[in-house]
Amino acid sequence: MAYTALYPGTFDPLTFGHLDMMMRASMLCTTLIVGVAENPGKNPLFNLEQRKLFVEIEINKMKAEGSISETVEVLAFKGLLTDFAKQVNASMLIRGLRAVSDFEYEFQMASANKRLSQNLETVFLTASEQQHFVASRLVKEIARYGGDVTSFVPEPISNKLRSVFKDNN
Ligand code: PNS
């Protein structure tokens, strides 16, 4: 049987923590769709096209290195996650859990998504030890004040963050 899993997120911006999740999630399914959400409510720093492009660049690099399956796809979506999951025929939603503090939000979201789509299961993967504290929000804050984010995000993203915040410092 073929399993399609959906790993959704805002990816504002993509971090090494997200990439680690993608690599591990891709081993649990036949096809992994990385769903980049528009999420206007979060007021993202990067627009949807930029966020999707950053994910595509890294996934393509990993495919070329052979470190991720060729069946990983990156798609942008607007609107409800459960509608998008139906559209791509996903039976699993993958979410990463970093710490206890993530749990309440994730539990709420998984429960609401279950109510909206009974056949869709949320599967949680725990963040790897090296990545457990990496959050996009922290990365942006560090970059905003001129800090070095090269150990948190891929190089094209750290360069972009530096140029976005260069006038702040
Ligand atoms: O990376 P994030 O910001 O934690 O991801 C949150 C995301 C994109 C999964 C969530 O905001 C979402 O599903 N947005 C789409 C709109 C939606 O369906 N909202 C209801 C979720 S219960």
Image (cartoon, grey):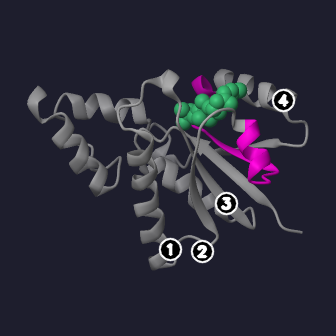
Q: Report if the CB atoms under discs 3 and 4 are less than 8 Å apart.
A: no
Badge 4 amino acid: Leu
Q: Is mark 4 within 8 Å of ligand 1?
A: yes
Residue 116's label in the rendered image is 4
Of the image marks 3 and 4, the number of the one nearer the N terminus: 3
* Image quadrant containing the N terminus: bottom right
Q: Position of residue 13 (x, y in %)?
A: 40, 42
Q: How much space separates mark 2 and mark 3, taking CA atoms? A: 10 Å
Q: Tell me the number on the disc at residue 63.
A: 1
Up/down of 60 relative to 163, above or below: below
Q: Position of residue 161 (x, y in %)?
A: 24, 41
The tag earlier along the polypeptide, 4 or 2, is 2
Residue 36 lies in quadrant: top right
Q: Is residue 12 magenta?
A: no
Q: Is residue 116 visible?
A: yes
Badge 3 marks a residue whose secondary structure is strand
Q: Nearer the viewer, residue 64 or 48?
A: 48
Residue 169, can we see it?
no
Give amino acid for label 1: Lys
